[in-house]
């Protein structure tokens, strides 16, 4: 049933927890893990880049490589992809145009004003994905 899992990662703590979960799922299901990281573009990405002084392309590549390394060390068949754009849109588009059965994504579990201001990438993926989505919350 689930032979191709899509892991969306940005290298954050919630994404690392999602990576652990996705690798375990892929191991148990004998599934291929498709790792996707998105180099953010647009106004939010520019303000994030100003605050963190990091290159979005490098961040995306580093996140994908770390997830791929973890999956391969568990003998999970893995592919990686880097896309540019709005993360939630790119994840959904990848799921629509590639043979994936499930998406695994981390979530910081924000609520209240913080959620209203920044929205939730995971929530948008859940809302628009063509396949089931597993969200993995950051440990508190």
Image (cartoon, rainbow, N blue to C red):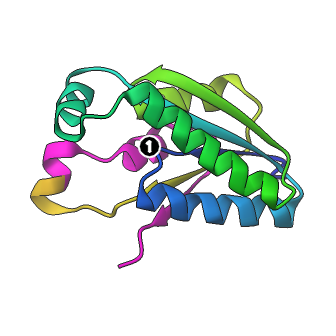
- Residue 137 higher or lower than 131, as above or below: below
Question: Looking at the image, can residue 130 be seen?
Answer: no
Q: Quadrant of residue 89?
A: top left
Q: Is residue 94 left or right of residue 101?
A: left
Whole-percent x, y for residue 111 in the image: 21, 62
Q: Quadrant of residue 18?
A: bottom right
Magenta span? 115-140
Whole-percent x, y for residue 11 in the image: 47, 49
Residue drawn at (63%, 64%), measured in percent from left and top?
20
Q: Nearer the viewer, residue 85 or 71?
A: 71
Whole-percent x, y for residue 110 in the image: 25, 61
Q: Secondary structure at mark 1?
A: helix
Seen as rendered, the residue at the extreme left is: 113
Q: Is residue 37 left or right of residue 39?
A: right
Seen as rendered, the residue at the extreme front is: 53
Question: Looking at the image, can residue 119 be seen?
Answer: yes
Q: Is residue 60 left or right of residue 73?
A: left
Q: Residues within 10 Å of mark 1 (few under 14, many from 20)?
A: few
Whole-percent x, y for residue 69 in the image: 71, 50
Image quarter hosting the C terminus = bottom left
Is 119 included in the stretch rendered in magenta? Answer: yes
Is 63 included in the stretch rendered in magenta? Answer: no
The residue where tag 1 is placed is 127
- Residue 29 higher or lower than 92, as above or below: below
- Residue 90 higher or lower than 108, as above or below: above
Residue drawn at (67%, 22%), measured in percent from left and top?
97
């Amino acid at each position: 049933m689930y032979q191709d899992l899509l892991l969306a990662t940005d290298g954050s703590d919630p994404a690392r927890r999602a990576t652990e979960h996705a690798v375990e799922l892929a191991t148990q299901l004998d599934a291929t893990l498709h790792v996707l990281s998105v180099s953010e573009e647009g106004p939010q990405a520019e303000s994030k880049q100003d605050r963190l002084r990091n290159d979005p392309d490098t961040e995306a590549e580093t996140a994908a490589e770390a997830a791929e390394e973890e999956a391969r060390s568990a003998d999970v068949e893995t592919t990686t992809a880097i896309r540019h754009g709005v993360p939630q849109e790119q994840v959904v588009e990848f799921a629509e145009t590639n043979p994936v059965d499930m998406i695994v994504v981390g979530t910081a579990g924000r609520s209240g004003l913080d959620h209203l201001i920044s929205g939730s990438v995971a929530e948008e993926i859940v809302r628009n994905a063509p396949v089931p989505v597993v969200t993995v919350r950051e440990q508190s």
